[in-house]
Amino acid sequence: MNKMLLIFILPLVLITSFQTTTVSSAEPTRDSDELRLQDMLILMLTPYIEKDLNSYYYPKILRDFSPDVTPWKIELIETSRVNGFRGFILQFTFEIEPTDGGQWIPVGKDRMTYEISVGPEVKLINHTHLKTYEYPLE
């Protein structure tokens, strides 16, 4: 099922992105085709992001629970084509703030780059842990 959705979304993303696009950090104030495509991409990649963050955070940083990833805590930073114009190997860089999953308290901040290619194949290219937030004790 995930493969079918990725097959549907990849052409849509390709339509809106050319060589390299840096996404504006300004919060959008209204809906657009580009924003909907970004949101679809984030929704499709959230399971991959969550799996990779869980293996990084638990139990190395968090011992009592695995971090939760929510789409509204994922920001698309950059998109690029690896193999030139109309090439179908794409890279997406995200900044993510995983939370505790219960009260949505951020537990850290990470920058992750994923590569999507024909298949579809999704693989983590780079993961940089930027910050660990101190989790408040009760």
Image (cartoon, grey):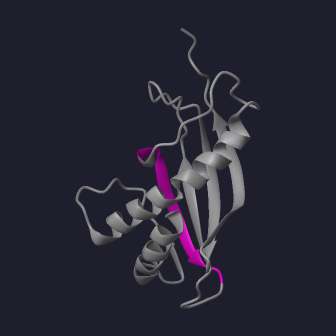
Residue at the spot 63% in from the left edge and 55% down from the top edge = 112
Magenta range: 72-82
The foreground one among 69 and 135 is 69
Asked whether 39 or 109 is in front, the reply is 39
Looking at the image, residue 138 lies above or below residue 51: above
Asked if 16 appears above or below 75 in the picture, the reply is below
Magenta stretch contains residue 76:
yes
**Image point (30%, 57%), residue name:** 28
Residue furthest to the left in view is 30
| Residue 18 rendering spot, x and y as whole percentages | 48, 83
- The image quadrant that residue 115 belongs to is bottom right
On the image, the x and y values in percent for residue 3 come to 53, 69
Please give left or right for residue 71 compared with residue 82 in the image: left
x 33%, y 64%: residue: 36
Q: Position of residue 9 (x, y in %)?
A: 44, 72
Picture quarter containing residue 39? bottom left
- Position of 73 with respect to 113 (left or right) is left
Q: Is residue 72 above or below residue 104?
A: below
The image position of residue 113, as x and y in percent, is 64, 61
Q: Is residue 109 magenta?
A: no
Instruction: Name the main secondary structure of what is drawn in magenta.
Output: strand
From what the image shows, is residue 138 above or below residue 65?
above
Taking 56 as reference, is 117 left or right? left
